[in-house]
Image (cartoon, rainbow, N blue to C red):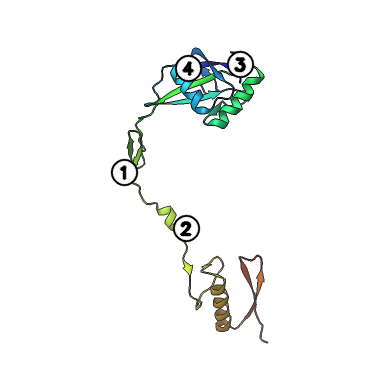
Amino acid sequence: MSKIPIMLKSNGNWDNYGRFRDFEVDAIVVDDNANYGILSSTIAEQLSIDTSDKIIEIKYIVNENCPPMEIRNDMGVRAYMETKKENKNLGSYPLCISVRDFNMELAINNESTSAGSSGSLNLLEFPSSPAIEEYQSEIITESTQTYIEEGQVYQDKQTVAAAMKNYSVMHKFQFRVKRSSHRRQRQLMIRQCSR
């Protein structure tokens, strides 16, 4: 188990090009088998961050052509440590630390939807969406349909078959079923021409 020195860039901000600007520099040393909890608590202790009311975002830049990678869990820490083992230089792959308030106020402005938070999100009102109701289709459960068209939704295959049999008798034509899969049936209608 070896120790790895890591440079910390903190109290900065990200620009539009994915670069961390206007930061302060610090450093930590962690074991190469550290997990997310150990890494984040070491960073919080070194930078004097109270994690009870602050959220720590940990990111690093692999190369200039990629956006910054965020460390969110143990797998992210392992990937970072493997990358860092290749170049243990203090200045290589520095961690960019951003801190946000945990008790952030949240406001969603959408006519009748609003929410406020102090540690948890409480949804006060959620309007029903008429767009969803437009796409609801009626499920046909009766086999005595007088009108059959493409796109209708039936309860099951037996209902479709019975509806087609009744419809073919009423309108005097034949049909046969072509199975396209074990879940779906297609009816081919054969009209008889009487001369």
Q: Check disc 4 and give the amino acid type.
A: Ser
Give residue 82's mark: none
Q: Earlier in the sequence, mark 1 or mark 3?
A: 3
Marks 2, 1: nearer the viewer = 1
SS assignment at label 1: loop
Q: Check disc 1 and give the amino acid type.
A: Leu
Which residue has dot 4 on it?
Answer: 10
Which residue has dot 2 on it?
Answer: 135
Which residue has dot 1 on it?
Answer: 124
SS assignment at label 3: loop
Q: Check disc 3 and give the amino acid type.
A: Ser
Give residue 92's mark: 3
Q: CA distance from mark 4 to mark 1?
A: 36 Å
Q: Earlier in the sequence, mark 2 or mark 3?
A: 3
SS assignment at label 2: loop
Which corner quadrant of the image does residue 34 belong to?
top right
Of the pair 9 and 108, the residue shown nearer to us: 9
Q: Residue furthest front?
A: 1
The answer to whether the residue labelled 3 contacts the one labelled 4, judged by CB atoms less than 8 Å apart, is no
SS assignment at label 4: strand
Q: CA distance from mark 3 to mark 4?
A: 16 Å
